[in-house]
Image (cartoon, grey):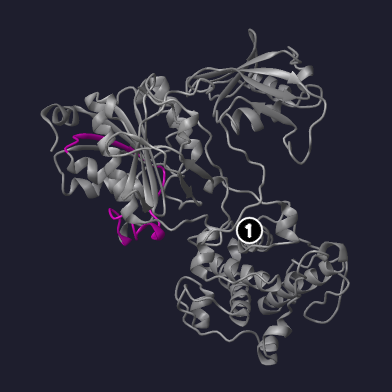
Amino acid sequence: MASTSQSEAIKGAKVLMVGAGGIGCELLKTLALSGFQDIHIIDMDTIEVSNLNRQFLFRQSHVGQSKAKVAREAVLKFRPHINITAYHANVKDPQFNVEFFQQFNVVLNGLDNLDARRHVNRLCLAAKVPLVESGTTGFLGQVTVHVKGQTECYECQPKPTPKTYPVCTITNTPSKFVHCIVWAKELLFAKLFGDKNQDNDLNVRRSSNDSDGNGSSDASKDVFELSPHESPDQYARKIYDHVFGSNIKAALSNEETWKNRKRPRPIFVSDVLPEEERNGGVHSEDGMGLIPSAMGSLGLKNPQEIWNLSENTRVFLEAVKLFFERREKEIGNLTFDKDDQLAVEFVTAAANIRASSFGIPLQSLFEAKGIAGNIVHAVATTNAIIAGLIVIEAIKVLSGDSKNYRMTYCLEHPNRKMMLMPVEPFEANPSCYVCSETPLLLEVNTATTKLRDVIEKVVKSKLGMNLPLVMQGSTLIYEEGDDLDADMLANYAINLDKALNELPTPVTNGTTLSVEDLQQELTCNINIKHRDEFDEEKEPDGMVLTGWSGPNTKPEKSNPSSNGESSSAAGAKRKLEEISDLNGKNKGIALEVEVNVVDDDVSVLNEFPTINKKTRVQ
């Protein structure tokens, strides 16, 4: 039971929720049932079928509608007398500025991406409004409290980012199923059905061994082009033989590559299917329904079954045929979507055939979809637990009970008989450029690097600024915004393509740039250090920024996790060397947790803190 002071704080509070997905649905329900009277929700997403198994405020009839608005309507049915305001919008829109945030007593995050979370963190700092952050992935979850002047901010420590893989590994020497998924999704699917003008690392020229459906060969012909006299069945078989047969055969000619590796096996349709299926197409059933599905037309019903090579071949050929017969108008504009059944079927089959060629264990459509969609399948119970913890911390914040603030971690397995690990919050990192205003250092070749590269790779990508303003001393050298006139825009466009030392006020060794985002009310200084050369492999940007709490994005070798996804920066390990037990005493417990990539509607789970490297708030 809440005390009288807590009850008054709850009833008088004006709360902003950002995100109405997996955590957000549970959070809105818990806030309403806890007595909160004035709740505002921001979410830009609409409801998808895949949300319905855990976002309990939504129903089939709501698919395609605003999450924020439907969540509001659902809660008002059982709490009709409270005020809920819904915004179907992006939290980064100009209307949600510092002044907007200042009207709230606390902000509660249930976001699904790092960029938006950093943006909200900065607005809360500028508005001096407490922020309660959260995240879940599978059975793991966390809640953290961020109060300016009392605790660290959200950006005081590095945050994980999704893993990247070297192109050469994906295209030539896959060793894990995730490599096959990336190849099928980012290269083959994009080449066949996406933008034809985009660069693609697949081999698009046929080799001299390649033959089309008529037995002819043409070394100059683009094998991915559908010829006028080619049926979808013939085209599908041609693509299959090219990518799984001829390309693998050509790769085997490089003996050096396979000295210390297992040699892959070229696979042609003739190796897998009987002659009647090769010549007459794959048998499929009629009446596939409104949504084309290779599984449906082939009579495959269980997405958790692992298809054999023949079944994967049939699904691949049928999926290509269905794209050209049922969705021809979309070809050329498609991008992979985990909610697109036919796309998932195609990617699963293509990845499994490639995996079979390279001796990698095959996976079911269910598992492949999780990997392709960067999913650790969400657990509704975890979301409910985390939502409850958010509300507990929000009540402490509203009651001014700072001594009892806790960062709480929800674990998959008990540790010292506890599933929830409370940790006292930490003081701000004195090196944090966001909340401590510490200058950054940028090593860059000022004679060759263009201002555009600094804006895109550093100011926007690494520092997360949306509308940057860049000054050297009193000279404005670049600015973005809606209120700029044509002459100013033209002048800034000219500056973007100039090398740093060629700008009207040259940027050279020892120069200090002031970078500001007016929307976030964030300013930081960047000290420039000239450097002639950079390691292309280790420093691909051609510049090095130090002093920011960003992730290490360099590709690393990693072991595959249980769902086939490799553990990565988005699934980094960190040891919790000390935690607070229920009596508030510190114990020397070593707890290692591996976090995988998350579902699209829940937040990235931050790394667990290494306590001996930071100072707790006293």
Q: Is residue 437 left or right of residue 245?
A: left
Magenta segment includes 54: yes
Splitting the image into 4 quarters, where does residue 266 fall? bottom right
Q: Which residue extends farthest top?
A: 474
Residue displayed at 51% across by 61% down: 562
Residue 468 x/y as whole percent = 57, 24
Magenta segment includes 123: no
Splitting the image into 4 quarters, where does residue 225 fall? bottom right
Report the span colored magenta.
Answer: 35-60
Q: Which residue extends farthest bottom?
A: 276
Locate the C terminus by quadrant: top left
Residue 50 x/y as whole percent = 41, 60
Q: Is residue 85 visible?
A: no
Label 1 Cα crowd, 10 Å radius (few <14 / some 14-19 / many 20+) = many
Q: Is residue 424 left or right of residue 157?
A: left
Element under label 1?
helix
